[in-house]
Amino acid sequence: MVGQRRLRWWAALFLAPAVVLTAVFFYYPMAYILWLSMHHWNGLSPVKPFTGLAEFRHLFKQPIFGLVIRNTAIFVVGTVVPSIAIGLALALLANRRLPFRSFLRGVSFAPYLVSFVSAGLAWVWMGSSGGLFDHLMGFLGFHPGNLVDNPSYALLYVIAMYTWKMAGYNMVLYLAGLQTIPREIYEAGAIDGLQDGWTQFRTITWPLLAESTFFVVIINLIFSFRAFSAIYVMTNGGPVNSTTTLVYYIWNLAFVQNSWGQAAAASALLLIVVLALTVGMVRYFTKESFRAS
Amino acid sequence: MTQRTRWLAPIAMASLGSMVLAGCGTSQTAAKGSTGPVSLTFEEGIQSPQTEAYLQKQIAAFEKSHPGIHISMQNYGAADSELPKLESSVAAHDPPNLLWIAPAYTGQFASSDAIVEAQKYFKSTNFQASSIFPGLLKTGEYHGKVWTMPFDANDLGVYYNKKLFAKAGITTPPATWTQFLADAKKLTSNGTYGFEMPIGNQEWTVWIWETLLWQAGGHLLNSSQTKVAFDSPAGIKALEYWNTLMKDHVATFGPLNDSYQLGAFESGKVAMTINGPWNVAALQQQHAVSYGAFPLPKDKVAATNIGGESLFIFNTTPAQDKAAFLFAKYVTTPAFQIGYDTGSGYLPVSKTAQDSAQYQAYLKKNPFINVFVKEMAVGKARPPIPAYPQISADIGNAIENTLYGRMSAAAALHQASVQAQQALDASS
């Protein structure tokens, strides 16, 4: 009994650094943002008067708020779905015995290693009027002009850049998942008559990748919700706020407009959305993996 | 993983999302003595190395004439990235003593007690406020008192491509909106546009648009600064004028939010663009375009927007605050101003410096700069009120909504004015 109590103290001691760091860098800022969302603050003033839910009301009344939510939804769905699909396709390809397998893996992963700032600047350049994309599409008889400065294309273009960067990362995650699937299962499947690739994928590979998919979906959701530097570098949220997502809007409210209360209110909203989605995903996938096993 | 601990994972992951706003500043409260030698930190964002070297030399001269005061200078790079850092340094009670930045932030810093009112030192240090252009002093006013001290000045004018003007048969630059539109039409031909339209909802676009509002006889705020006033016939006229330039296809958008860049002008793709005097060195170095400048065309009246930087004195110790003011005063002396301005293309802040034989000789050699100096006479300044950044953002959205054809000028300005009024009410 005494030994067990001592063990508990040791455990507490070893856990302390992690607990303290999480408290200081995660839970304190979270609590502070919730507190700040009910106060008016310009970022400098020593006084922060209590305003109740007024900051939320102001936020919802902003004429561009609906647009920001719409942009965020399009951006998140538009980046998460294709980057996972392409990542999975690349992983399946890179998992085969192909002549240039290492090269394929390297090339697919390389975009992820480039910083969002340099990649963003390169894409701005390629998407300019008379740039690479304009030129290539010219062969199809279509001249979109400057993609970044066009409110109809800007969001799609940023999504394309983001997907290009994330697909390789998802490939690596899926590749790791694929390599944990024992060869014997495929052999057993073959004996039972599972010959063609699509049936193999549907009945063996995809169910056994459930855990990888769970992780990939959640990490991509969080990354996409938080995406900032690509938007900051490529479009500054414009033109006509067509690429202003919730996170970019939070930054703009806080650091450009000095409306920290509204920025905190928007952050609280983001927190709730991401939390709800993550909890939903965990619920869904835990049920799924039970079914699989 | 048990069912219970499984629930912790999403919470931990989701809390990553809340980290967006979590900035942290280093907190160091060094003991700053009030007696003996005074050390000051001075943060500036001067881009040109030559100008910075000149400033360094002047600081040495100042230290010589003011024994006991030591200034260490530090470059902060871009102003946009400096502001968040400043906010955290103020929160951590460790701000710089002196800061070189646009006076538009005066209201925000003054209302938060982060900076010291400069005017309270005028008498005791024998500072002649009348030596500074009154319009410039106004850029640093808050509640009727001068809080920040002018360091350098600039304003806006039109750059034009002399060769394209000659080709279009234009002998005198346009002086009115009507002439400007007519000339822009003449200058537009396959691939070349008459005018580069600033675009984006950030300050550069808004700063330029405000000159049109004033030229049309409009105002940003009422005289007591309690009501926004840009949603007026003059405001609508100003925005519709820009819209006409776009609809008539005599103007093309500049780079989004970066329309101060000169790429299209220097490559001869646009014949006219609005910019300031500070590009003089860069323009002299290129040989592709033969350039000139003329004053912004007028509508009802002539107007330009005064810019430039001021010195902010942060609230530290009384001795440091006063020493910092002495340096701000030194900067306004003709000796400092003449050397600084002839090297940088900035404009003088005092009439004495501007009228000096040395500066006048410089203007004779640089007629380009002279255009901007003369325009200062019709210069107006943005109100340095705490709500200005929000009002500017609302106007920026109105400009984009109109020029991209999403809304009429009247509807866009009305929507912006409702938002801006809310911001103004919340800040007062």
Image (cartoon, coloured by chain):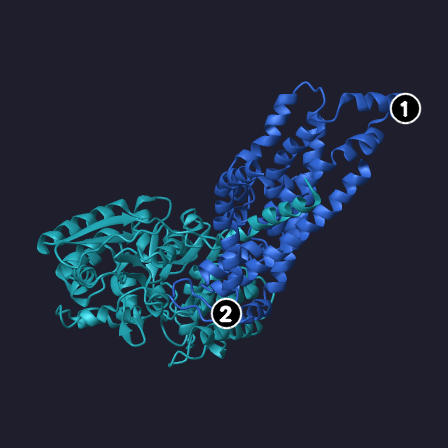
Question: Is any part of residue B35 visible from this angle?
Answer: yes
Circle 1: element type: loop
What residue is at 36 percent from the left and 50 percent from the top? Answer: B26
Separation of residues labelled 2 and 1 (CA atoms): 73 Å
Circle 2: element type: helix
- The residue lying toward the viewer, choosing from A106 and B133, is A106
Chain appearing in cyan on the rendered image: B
Q: Given the image, what chain letter belongs to the residue carrying mark 1?
A: A
Given the image, on which type of amino acid does mark 2 rest? Answer: Leu
What residue is at 61 percent from the left and 23 percent from the top? Answer: A103
- Residue B301 lies left or right of residue B359; in this view the side is right
Q: Residue B175's x, y, as percent?
A: 37, 68
Q: Given the image, what chain letter belongs to the residue carrying mark 2?
A: B
Question: Is any part of residue B200 visible from this angle?
Answer: no
Q: Which mark is residue A192?
A: 1
Query: Label 2, on which residue?
Result: B239
